[in-house]
Amino acid sequence: MMGVQATASRLFFDFCLDDHVPIDHQLRGIDQHLDLARVRAALKPFYSSTGRPSIDPELMIRMLLVGNCMGIRSERRLCEEVHLNLAYRWFCRLGLDGKVPDHSTFSKNRHGRFRESNILRHLFETVVARCMAEGLVSADGFAVDASLIPADVNKHHSVRSSDWKPEDISDEACRATREYLATLDDAAFGAATPVPPKFVSLADPAAQWTAQRKGPAFFAYSTNYLIDTDHGVIVDVEATRSIRQAEVGAAQTMLDRTEDRFGLKPGYLTADTAYGAAQNLAWLVKRKQITPHIPVFDKSTRTDGTFSRSDFTWDPDADRYTCPAGKELVQFRRTYAMPRTGVAR
């Protein structure tokens, strides 16, 4: 006999939201160790003492954690998912009838109070401190690397760097452009290298035109991670342009900051060849007393048809190099419009 689902009319329901969230759900494990007690105290100076009550900052941070843990990149979709998903509602302390804030609230707070108070870094460092207290960070050795984050810009809305004039930008430019102009002298962005990029995005000038994935070039940023090799715990993070010089500078910044905030200094640092420049290796060994486990950034072997370093012959007695053509290399030489006579060198 075929059954028919019948919905009984009831005036009252006995419903416990906690009973409908699985015991092994990811958010239960996060909630068990999440400490947001200091969030309100850290944000209090950035709120007015008068006016209507604002959205609870703890609610917004919990929703942002849901988005990051569940891979929900769109804040508009995040609000929809929290509205519908019982586990998300439980984690955000919304209950069954709690109102989900509008998606525009996140962008306003992220570019306002959250940035001014640096609350997200405060929350990150709270998690690192908890990992240290649980013995998950040994500081025997760290590893550093960068991941590419594609920028949300269109290649067709960009210009060649020679056609981009920062001095012509007005005060009414978009927020990303004004923020980039403010970081032109920052080692992580404008001052990372004197070499101008091939293209500049009009909507987001700080995004770097790169092709590091050995595929089509695109605009991107780099997220740099400093990781404890014992348990794979990320102890610091820094965002830069996607260029080697900026990533090396970010590694130094993270090492200094980790030592200053937590008193952690690794015995060795592991990284790939991008971090193997002589200046960086000297900084690690001489200034920080950290053993680098990093391949040397060596360009002595040429593949462009020019001579490699091994093609030159060194004569220690005469203190000179001889090129493959038999010519002696001199240390100093000036170029004159009219060649001088009677001069051997």
Image (spheres, rainbow, N blue to C red):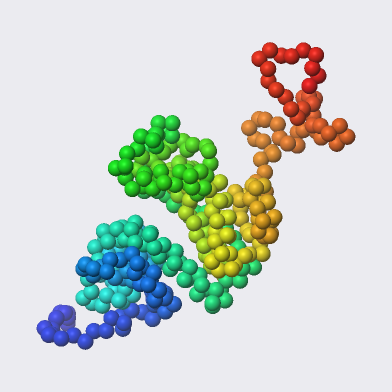
Image quarter where the N terminus lies is bottom left
Work out whether 48 lies above or below 94. Answer: above
Residue lying furthest front: 49
Task: Report the front residue among 156 and 265.
Answer: 265
Count of number-bearing discs: 0
Task: Report the front residue among 158 and 8.
Answer: 158
Residue at the location (58% across, 64% down)? 259
Relative image position of residue 303 (x, y in whole percent): 65, 35
Relative image position of residue 284 (x, y in whole percent): 65, 55
Left or right of 96, for residue 21 = right
Residue at the location (41% across, 38% down)? 200
Residue lying furthest right: 317
Image quarter where the C terminus lies is top right
Work out whether 345 lies above or below 89. Answer: above
Residue at the location (21% across, 68% down)? 52
Relative image position of residue 78 (x, y in whole percent): 30, 63
Relative image position of residue 19 (x, y in whole percent): 31, 83
Would residue 167 be seen by someone viewing this image from the given angle? Answer: yes
Task: Report the front residue among 80 and 330.
Answer: 330
Would residue 324 be seen by someone viewing this image from the given angle? Answer: no
